[in-house]
Amino acid sequence: MLAVGAELPAFVQNRCFARLGWDRKVRSFCRDRRIVYQGFSLLTANPEVLYHPLVVRMAAHGNATPAHVIFRFAHAIGIVPLTGTSNVDHMKQDLASRELALSAEAVLTARGERSGRPIRAMLTPQKSAKLASFSRGKRSPMIFTTGC
């Protein structure tokens, strides 16, 4: 599209796999062109991250669930999470992730910058501003769809 001068989309919706860097190249393309990146299957496609001991500890420390941690991490790296739930309670739980505040230290640890042993699947480049907003629990949009 870009090569032929076609109009670029306002949104990109992609299935997002942690083991593939959370779709890093597509997110970078989108960020550079001010396209909103929306990720789906953040939980179902990434059970190895959802149940990783570090994510479980972060959740316990934040009085949250591992799903909350994944959604906040997604926000921090520029992903607007899409969820396909039609369950009202699950929607409320997913929205509660916007209130989760994890420390910048916790994010650096998840990225392996403190221990030297990262959660491979969670490795992504982040700028200090992203870490700061993540640690302050900055609110960001979350979109809910059914039947994704």
Image (cartoon, rainbow, N blue to C red):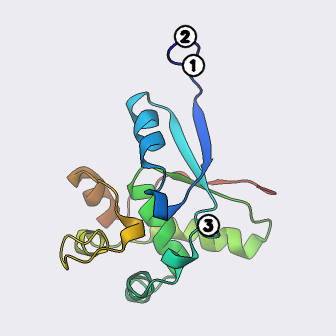
Q: Quadrant of the N terminus?
A: top right
Q: Residues within 10 Å of mark 1 (few under 14, many from 20)?
A: few
Q: In 3D space, how far apart are the residues under numbered discs 2 and 3 (Cα atoms)?
A: 33 Å
**Residue 25 position (above or below residue 59):** above
**Residue tagged by mark 3?**
45
Amino acid type, mark 3: Ala
Q: Earlier in the sequence, mark 1 or mark 3?
A: 1
Q: Quadrant of residue 63?
A: bottom left
Of residue 44 and residue 96, the one placed in the foreground of this image is: 44
Amino acid type, mark 1: Met
Q: Are marks 2 and 1 in contact (CB under 8 Å)?
A: yes
Q: In 3D space, how far apart are the residues under numbered discs 1 and 3 (Cα atoms)?
A: 28 Å
Q: Residues within 10 Å of mark 3 (few under 14, many from 20)?
A: some
**Residue 59 position (above or below residue 14):** below
Q: Residues within 10 Å of mark 2 (few under 14, many from 20)?
A: few
Of residue 120 and residue 68, the one placed in the foreground of this image is: 120
Q: Is residue 115 left or right of residue 145?
A: left
**Residue tagged by mark 2?**
4
What x and y, as percent, mark residue 46?
56, 70
Residue 1, disc: 1
Q: Which type of secondary structure does the marked residue at label 1 adopt? A: loop
Q: Quadrant of the C terminus?
A: bottom right
Of residue 54 and residue 118, the one placed in the foreground of this image is: 118
What x and y, as percent, mark residue 137?
37, 64
Amino acid type, mark 2: Val
